[in-house]
Amino acid sequence: MNAKTIRCENDLTLFGKLLQHPDVVRTNEHLEKLADEGSTGLRRRLLATSVRLDPSMAKTVHAAADVCIEKLDLEIPVELYVFPSPQFNAACFKPEAGRLFVMFSSSLLEGFDDRELRFVMGHELGHHVYRHHDIPIGYILQGGTRPDFSLALELFAWSRYAEISADRAGAHCANDLNAVARALFKLASGLSGVTIEFNLEAFLAQVDDMQVVDAEPGQGAPKEDWFSTHPFSPLRVKALQLFHQSILAKTSGMSKEDLEVAVQRLMSLMEPSYLEGHTRSAEAMRRALFAGALAVASANDDISDAEIEIFETFFGKGSYTERLNIDKLEEELPARLDQVRESTSVPQRMQLLHDLCIIARAEGRVSEVERAVLDKIAGGLEVPNRFICQTLDTDLELD
């Protein structure tokens, strides 16, 4: 088993497609020009704002890096940095001047043991191994030019599968399900393990109890974590559990083909599949999305051409016409939200609100009146308002 064979298939497929997208090509050409002009200065910023970890001062960290570098077949010099923070965090940056940079928070280095650190280290290095930084997702989605909305949706979908691949790279480096689970437990809870005794069976039982496909999230993590790729998501834990049950981790495990099908089924919770569904719940969600999208778009009085384009991305060309009675749809919205609440699970309602947040953010800044509409919709769906903040403010860079 090597890094290439364990990569998530959907990550690889979407990566290849996105890499050829004109907007991605254009953005990469712009970034390459900046790099040639010496405009990025990444290493300079790291040296100025964090501490470079020399092997003599961080033997354990470098030992973990050496294991991961060997297992992932890296052939590039790696520099390790630490920055002060009480939050468990880590990041890998696109190489500069022939060097690869990985940065860790001080609390993570002090709170994780050797094999837990290997998982985190392998995850970060996995982003480089799989060339994930060749898709500059943050730059595209948060840049000055609004991307095509269909591209934005593809980027969000790809980024989730990219995290699955990086998690597999980390698990490959750790080679210890207990250590991987402990690391994820620490990322989920923020606990270092000093005051709480970790129990693998209990932790995995919690994930199983979530019944990802058709039930509500479990009680051990905030519900909004179901739509987060950083720092922790129960979906990622479940995907890693599947990985450890596959032939990629043990000789008698399920086939890679079955693994990928299971992971895709798992991740489909985060895809707007209700747009094509024929169930009562899917129909209720579409009706609420239709009215909710128009309510958000008209919050600033006028519906712009860009907002019409986004709306028609969901509902088809010509779905927006001047004949639509926006006032009547806004009046019907509470009743449509009631129908959603009565026929769907919490994750489905969160998916609906997530899509409305993406619509609101697609033009750039979300106005106060648009946010007020989203708050009302969240209340009608009985989804915590903080989920809106998480979706609107989410870090679009790979962790």
Image (cartoon, rainbow, N blue to C red):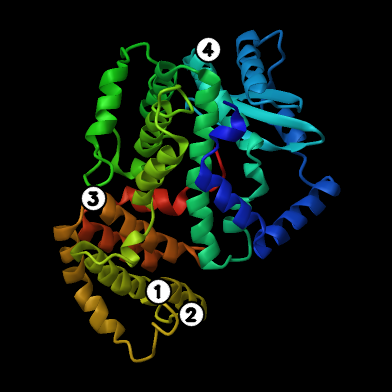
- Residue type, mark 4 in image: Asp
Question: In the image, is residue 317 above or below residue 390?
Answer: below
Q: Residue sitting at 55 percent across and 62 percent down?
A: 151
Most extreme residue toward the right, as rendered?
37
- Residue type, mark 1 in image: Ala
Question: In the image, is residue 388 above or below residue 329?
Answer: above
Which numbered disc, 1 or 4, marks the residue that appears first in the sequence? 4
Q: Nearer the viewer, residue 298 or 66?
A: 66
Residue position marked by numbered label 4 in the rendering: 114
Could you give the CA–CA distance between mark 4 and mark 3, rounded to whole angstroms? 37 Å
2 or 4: mark nearer the eye: 4
Residue position marked by numbered label 1 in the rendering: 297
Could you give the CA–CA distance between mark 1 and mark 4, rounded to whole angstroms? 50 Å
Residue 58 is labelled as none
Rendered image quadrant of residue 355: bottom left
Marks 1 and 2 in Cβ contact (< 8 Å): yes
Task: Characterize the local packing of mark 1: few (<14), some (14-19) or many (20 or more) Cα atoms within 10 angstroms.
Answer: many
Task: Characterize the local packing of mark 4: few (<14), some (14-19) or many (20 or more) Cα atoms within 10 angstroms.
Answer: some
Residue position marked by numbered label 2 in the rendering: 304
